[in-house]
Image (cartoon, rainbow, N blue to C red):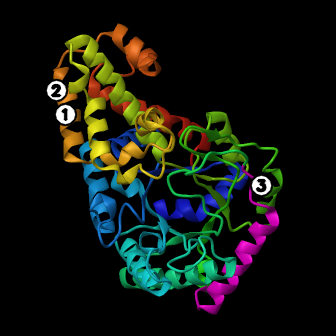
């Protein structure tokens, strides 16, 4: 059963070096690719929604937790994937969507959200109360974070009692920024082992004080900084030697594995090292929509060469118009002169363009692009030129030379790297 996978994850990692991939995306093509990849390997799949994407107010996807579950299950139905093998997770569940409000108001809303996630059947609950609210510092003391996490755990446990659920928790105080760093990366230090032990103990005490000791006993994951991150144009690759003392701290924390955020764009060898060092939950999100965008832009270039489509009628131009007309999702994240920001809007590792794919104008532009190809296979020479990372699989008959299949296969290539790294629970 999927619930047993989370409960047994610490032992599976210690004894067999296994882990699990966390798919953090609400894009239907990404979800479909994750399910197809899992079906081929006969693996379970962990799909997570974040507090900003999905909450009781709809988030930026317009979906509540129940809506999101139905959305994923509908894709599973189309692909023939067994829904009992899907683990649903809630990521960064806390006051973040309402941190502009006073703390008490934000926390009350976060309690409602956490309860809604549990009642919708989300069994992996990441409690993230590390951010300050209105009038508070951006980062809070561990003790404050722990007390607020215990408060949200109480709301989750109340919901679990109503619906007969048994949620597993992820805790932590050193939580990376959702979606990647907003500043240029220079050096990144792993969490000191003494800070890890302090985090666990302050949470243990706060949960006990709140009457939530049984909930703490079901905490299986601990978010720390392993020394991995990505920014707009740079990636900080895992340094195993630098994280050696951090990894060693798990030897005294047999209840836990580490959860690694922002692992997007790490080499497969680094992902495997992370799992081997106890980072048994590897989270990936923007890296998947980055692969989707790469494939769509490759198809856009092929269409220009094959169909003579003028640049001003192509997909990239349509996305540029859309992002300029509604800059709120990238402004403040990209910096430089106009040429630099234009490049980042389309090609940044931060992949802020992912927020625009659900827009009706973007969907119509993608549909026009796909429709131009009709039912004829795309010439392999053009795939070699503009989608070179997919060429070998097309040549060898492992991927049809059709646009929809190529986009899905591009995403699956990334997920495949993760699945090989975790050896799989």
- Along the horizontal axis of the image, is 286 left or right of 62? right
The residue located at (42%, 69%) in the rendering is: 97
Mark 2: give few (<14), some (14-19) or many (20+) Cα within 10 Å. few
> Regarding mark 1 in the picture, which secondary structure is present there?
helix
Which residue is pictured at 28% across the width and 63% down the height?
63
Residue 206 sits in quarter:
bottom right
- Residue 81 seen by the camera: no
Report the span colored magenta. 188-212
Could you say which disc has been placed on residue 371 in the image?
2
Which residue is labeled 3 in the image? 247
Distance between mark 3 and mark 2 Cα atoms? 50 Å
Which residue is depicted at the point 21% across and 18% down? 309
- Residue 74 position in % (x across, y down): 25, 52
Return the x and y of residue 270 as percentages of the image width and height: 67, 39
Question: Which one is nearer the viewer's eye here, 64 or 257?
Answer: 64
Rendered image: mark on residue 330: none
- Residue 193 appears in the figure: yes
Compared to 266, does 120 lie above or below?
below
Q: CA distance from mark 1 to mark 3?
A: 47 Å
Relative height, residue 123 to residue 308 (above, below): below
Q: Is residue 299 left or right of residue 241?
A: left
Marks 2 and 1, how far apart at CA:
6 Å
Label 3, secondary structure: give it. helix
Reply yes or no: does residue 271 show up in magenta.
Answer: no
Closest to the observer, 124 or 110: 110
Report if residue 203 lies within the magenta region: yes
């Amino acid at each position: 059963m999927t619930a047993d996978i989370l409960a047994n994850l610490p032992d599976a990692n210690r004894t067999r070096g296994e882990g699990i991939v966390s798919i953090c995306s609400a894009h239907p093509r990404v979800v479909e690719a994750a399910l197809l990849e899992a079906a081929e390997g006969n693996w379970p799949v962990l799909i997570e929604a974040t507090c900003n994407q999905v909450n009781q107010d709809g988030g930026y996807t317009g979906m509540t937790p129940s809506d999101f579950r139905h959305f994923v299950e509908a894709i599973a139905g189309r692909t023939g994937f067994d829904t009992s093998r899907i683990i649903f997770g809630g990521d960064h569940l806390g006051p973040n969507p309402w941190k502009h409000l006073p703390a008490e108001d934000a926390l009350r809303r976060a309690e409602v959200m956490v309860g809604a996630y549990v009642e919708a059947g989300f069994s992996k609950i990441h409690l993230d109360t590390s951010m300050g609210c209105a009038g508070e510092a951006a980062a809070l003391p561990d003790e404050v974070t722990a007390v607020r996490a215990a408060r949200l755990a109480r709301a989750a446990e109340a919901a679990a009692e109503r619906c007969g659920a048994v949620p597993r928790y992820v805790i932590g105080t050193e939580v990376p920024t959702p979606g990647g760093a907003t500043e240029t990366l220079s050096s990144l230090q792993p969490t000191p082992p003494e800070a890890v032990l302090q985090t666990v103990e302050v949470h243990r005490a706060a949960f006990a004080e709140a009457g939530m000791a049984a909930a703490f006993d079901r905490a299986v994951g601990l978010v720390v900084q392993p020394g991995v991150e990505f920014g707009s144009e740079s990636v900080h690759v895992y340094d195993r030697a630098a994280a050696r003392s951090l990894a060693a701290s798990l030897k005294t924390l047999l209840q836990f594995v580490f959860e690694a955020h922002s692992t997007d764009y790490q080499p497969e060898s680094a992902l495997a090292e992370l799992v081997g060092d106890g980072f048994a939950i590897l989270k990936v999100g923007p890296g998947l929509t980055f692969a989707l965008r790469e494939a769509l832009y490759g198809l856009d270039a092929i269409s220009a060469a094959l169909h003579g489509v003028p640049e001003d009628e192509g997909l990239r131009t349509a996305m540029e118009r859309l992002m300029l007309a509604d800059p709120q999702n990238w402004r403040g994240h990209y910096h430089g002169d106009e040429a630099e920001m234009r490049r980042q809007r389309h090609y940044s590792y931060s992949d802020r363009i992912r927020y625009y794919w659900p827009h009706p104008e973007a969907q119509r532009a993608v549909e026009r692009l796909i429709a131009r190809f009709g039912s004829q296979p795309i010439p392999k020479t053009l795939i070699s030129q503009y989608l070179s990372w997919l060429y070998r699989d097309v040549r060898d008959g492992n991927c049809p030379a059709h646009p929809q299949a190529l986009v899905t296969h591009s995403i699956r290539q990334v997920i495949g790297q993760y699945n090989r790294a975790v050896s799989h629970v």
